[in-house]
C-alpha cells in the first residue's frame, strides 16, 4: 500500500532542527507581508535617524530644522526648490502622495482625509512644520491648523497676496485643478480685493507631469484644448494655481497673450535655529519609486524611497 506524502502544517516542528526551519517556512509563505514590514521599519528608521541624529550628543532635536513638504506628487518640488534657495540651512522631508495622485479629481472629503494622514505621519516622525506644496491640499489649510498643533503653511493665501498686488487691470486667469477651482479658494480671496478671476479647470495637465510625458504630442493637444480661450480673456495675469504647472510653463506661455505668469509661493519662514552641518533633504513617495524618480528629472537627480501611509 502506498500513501501519498503530505506536507506537515509546520515542517520540522518536532525534529531536532527546531525553530529555524519554522521561521524560514513562515517567511517563505508570507514573503509579501514580511517585506512590507521591513520596508515600513526601514522608512521609519531613516526618518528617526534624520531627526534624532544629534540626540546622543545631547543636542536639541530642534537644531535639525526638519520641515515636511507635502504634495500629491512631484509638482510640489517646485515649492521645495524655492524653499531650498531661500532657506538652505533647513532640513526637509518631501512627501509625494503619488498613489493617490491626482487630488484634483477626487471628492473633498477624500482629499482632506488623505492629507490628514500625511500630516499625521510627518508630525509623528518629528516634523517641526508642514508646508502644503499643493493647491488642492491648501484648500483645507484652515481645518488642518485646527486639527494639528504644528505650524502649517499653504500656497493659496500667499499667492493671492502677490497677485492682488501685481495685477493692474484687476482681471486675472486661474489655471488650477478641478477641485481647486470648485472650492472657490482663489476666487473668494481675489474677489475681496476687487479682482475678477477667469477660471480654467486643468486637472488633465497633472498626469503628463507625473508620468514624465510633458514632451509628447498628447500633452500639447490637451493644453491647446484647455487653454484655447485664454488669449481672448483680456487678463494681465495668469496664475499657475497648481504646483505641477510650472513644469509646463514653456508650453503654457504661448497662450497667455503677454500676461504675466505667476507661480505659487508660500510664506514659510524658519522659526528655529539654523544647523551647523550641511542641510539634508529626504524624498518619499507612496507610489512607485522608479516612476517618481523619472517624473522628477527636471528637478535634479534624486532618489525617492517608498513609504506606506
Image (cartoon, rainbow, N blue to C red):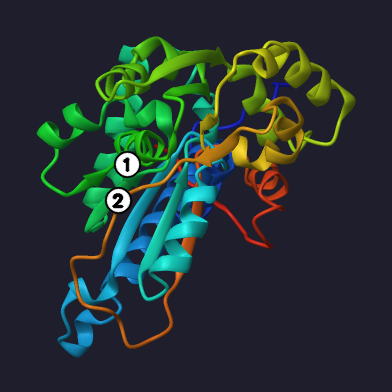
> On the picture, is 116 further left or further right than 41?
left
- Give me the residue at 74% from left, 40% from top: 250
> Mark 1 — residue?
158
Mark 2, other Cα within 10 Å: few <14 / some 14–19 / many ≥20 = few
Q: Secondary structure at mark 1?
A: helix
- Give me the residue at 28% from left, 69% from top: 65
Q: Nearer the viewer, residue 187 or 234?
A: 234
> Image quadrant of residue 206?
top right
Is 71 located above or below residue 189 in the figure? below
> Mark 2 — residue?
267
Q: Distance between the Cα atoms at labels 1 and 2?
A: 6 Å
Q: Nearer the viewer, residue 117 or 157?
A: 157
Q: Secondary structure at mark 2?
A: loop
Q: Which quadrant of the rendered structure holds the N terminus?
A: top right
Contact, mark 1 vs mark 2 (Cβ under 8 Å): yes
Residue 260 coordinates in the image, percent (x, y): 58, 38
> On the picture, is 156 further left or further right than 229?
left
- Give me the residue at 57% from left, 42% from top: 74
Q: Find the residue positioned furthest to the front.
A: 169
Is 2 located above or below residue 17 in the figure? above
Amino acid at each position: 500500500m502506498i500513501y501519498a506524502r503530505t506536507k506537515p502544517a509546520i515542517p520540522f516542528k518536532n525534529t531536532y532542527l527546531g525553530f529555524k526551519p519554522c521561521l524560514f517556512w513562515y517567511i517563505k509563505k508570507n514573503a509579501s507581508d514580511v517585506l512590507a514590514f521591513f520596508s515600513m521599519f526601514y522608512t521609519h528608521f531613516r526618518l528617526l535617524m534624520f531627526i534624532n541624529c544629534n540626540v546622543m550628543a545631547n543636542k536639541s532635536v530642534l537644531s535639525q530644522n526638519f520641515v515636511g513638504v507635502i504634495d500629491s506628487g512631484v509638482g510640489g518640488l517646485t515649492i521645495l526648490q524655492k524653499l531650498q534657495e531661500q532657506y538652505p540651512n533647513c532640513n526637509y522631508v518631501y512627501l509625494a502622495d503619488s498613489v493617490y495622485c491626482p487630488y484634483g479629481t477626487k471628492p473633498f472629503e477624500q482629499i482632506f482625509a488623505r492629507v490628514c494622514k500625511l500630516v499625521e505621519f510627518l508630525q509623528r516622525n518629528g516634523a517641526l512644520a508642514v508646508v502644503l506644496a499643493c493647491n488642492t491640499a491648501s484648500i483645507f489649510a484652515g481645518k488642518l491648523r485646527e486639527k494639528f498643533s504644528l505650524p502649517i503653511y499653504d500656497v493659496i493665501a500667499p499667492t493671492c497676496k502677490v497677485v492682488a498686488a501685481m495685477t493692474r487691470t484687476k482681471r486675472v486667469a486661474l489655471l488650477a485643478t478641478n477641485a481647486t477651482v470648485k472650492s472657490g479658494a482663489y476666487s473668494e480671496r481675489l474677489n475681496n480685493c476687487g479682482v475678477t478671476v477667469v477660471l480654467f479647470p486643468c486637472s488633465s495637465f497633472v498626469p503628463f507631469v507625473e508620468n514624465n510625458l510633458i514632451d509628447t504630442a498628447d500633452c500639447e493637444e490637451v493644453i491647446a484644448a484647455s487653454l484655447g480661450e485664454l488669449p481672448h480673456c483680456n487678463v494681465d495675469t495668469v496664475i499657475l494655481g497648481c504646483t505641477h504647472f510650472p513644469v509646463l510653463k514653456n508650453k503654457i506661455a504661448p497662450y497667455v497673450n503677454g500676461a504675466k505668469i505667476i507661480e505659487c509661493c508660500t510664506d514659510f519662514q524658519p522659526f528655529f535655529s539654523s544647523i551647523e552641518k550641511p542641510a539634508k533633504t529626504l524624498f518619499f513617495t507612496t507610489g512607485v519609486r522608479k516612476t517618481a524618480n523619472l517624473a522628477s528629472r527636471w528637478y535634479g537627480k534624486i532618489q525617492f524611497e517608498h513609504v506606506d501611509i
